[in-house]
Amino acid sequence: MKYYFAPLEGITGYIYRQAHHMFYPGIDRYFTPFIVPKEKKYLSTKERNDVLPEHNKGFDVIPQIMANKSEEFIRIARMLNQEYGYMEVNLNLGCPSKTVVSKGRGSGFLSYPEKLKAFLDITVNKLELYGMKLSVKTRIGKNNAEEFPQLLEIFEQFPLSELIIHPRIQADFYNYKPNLEAFAMANEAYENKESELCYNGDIFNIMDYKKICRIFPNICSIMMGRGILINPMLAEEIKVRENGGQLKKDSDLMNFRRFKDEEAEKAERKRRYMLYRKLLDEYLNIMSGDKDVLFKMKELWMYMCQDFTQPQKYMKKMKKAQRLADFEQAAEALCAEQRLL
């Protein structure tokens, strides 16, 4: 099984990827937050920093592009290839943001299957000429799951390196349960194809992972996003409990313990705090003011807090903090006073 880290805009840029890989190695592939083509023909400073090879040393990274015009997508892909050496790019058809969808991008592009087919026809052929691969990250439709069979039929026509499916529609955002029936349809369709199929959606713990592996034993990759932000050791936690690529028997999970003893749990809390301090120091080095860094830390800890017992009063202090010193005090206290779930 391969483990991918899904991109989350504003959080999983190169600084987070570097820090995560330093403290929690084991992710097989990171995906960058999406690049949107602009009128200017070059990448922004933020985008350039995010894809620079020297900022992504030691781990595999795939740039993600969000576009609905083939010429724009190809221009960015070609730039990433020629200037930065990337041999594969990913098309974002999953972002549910209303501002993105209103422009027919992200999961909004799924409303136009004929345009999507024409886009892929041109894009795949062009990228093949450049020796580049294309993977796609998609939802199963914009308004309802009945859109998915037509979309799946389109994806099947192209030699994608990988089809990553988040089995929700755009209108769901991240609510409701993933539609496993829709993913089962794709799993059957891709059973004998060279293109690989990856599952993405609501993998928050080892039990979630076990469920997906049991239902779809043939898939070879899993993408996780929010689950890793909440629990940075999630992929590591899954890997150490695998046996020959498969988890042990269901009965073994009856007595599942995340940590072998109190010292191991305490050591993990220390590692979480070290990850946070590394991120804090790196953001302070590149950002001009404490307020911007404080905003970054608040956004991150709204996820990280969720893996601790009784985090509410600490989250409240973090949210109210106007100074980095006050925020740091709350984060340090949480890691010292509360246990991991």
Image (spheres, helix red, strand yellow):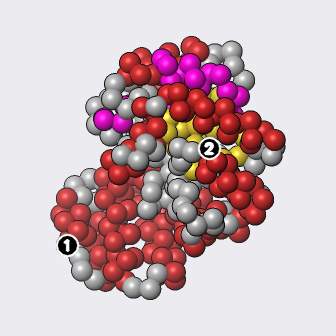
Name which residue type carries label 2: Ser
Badge 2 or badge 1: first in the primary sequence: 2
* Residue 254 falls inside the magenta stretch: no
Q: Residues within 10 Å of mark 2 (few under 14, many from 20)?
A: some
Q: Residue 21: x and y, percent?
A: 60, 59
Return the residue nearer the eye: 24 or 110.
110
Residue, disc 2:
70
Write the start and end of the magenta stretch as one range: 149-172
Location of the N terminus by quadrant is: top right
Q: Which mark is residue 320?
A: 1
* Residue 153 falls inside the magenta stretch: yes
Q: Residue 102: x and y, percent?
A: 36, 46
Is residue 57 among the parts visible in the rendering?
no
Residue at position x 53%, y 22% from top? 152
From what the image shows, is residue 224 above or below residue 304? above
Instruction: Tell whether 261 sits left or right of 43.
Output: left
Residue at position x 52%, y 56% from top? 36
In which image quadrant can residue 155 be found?
top right
Secondary structure of residue under mark 2 = helix
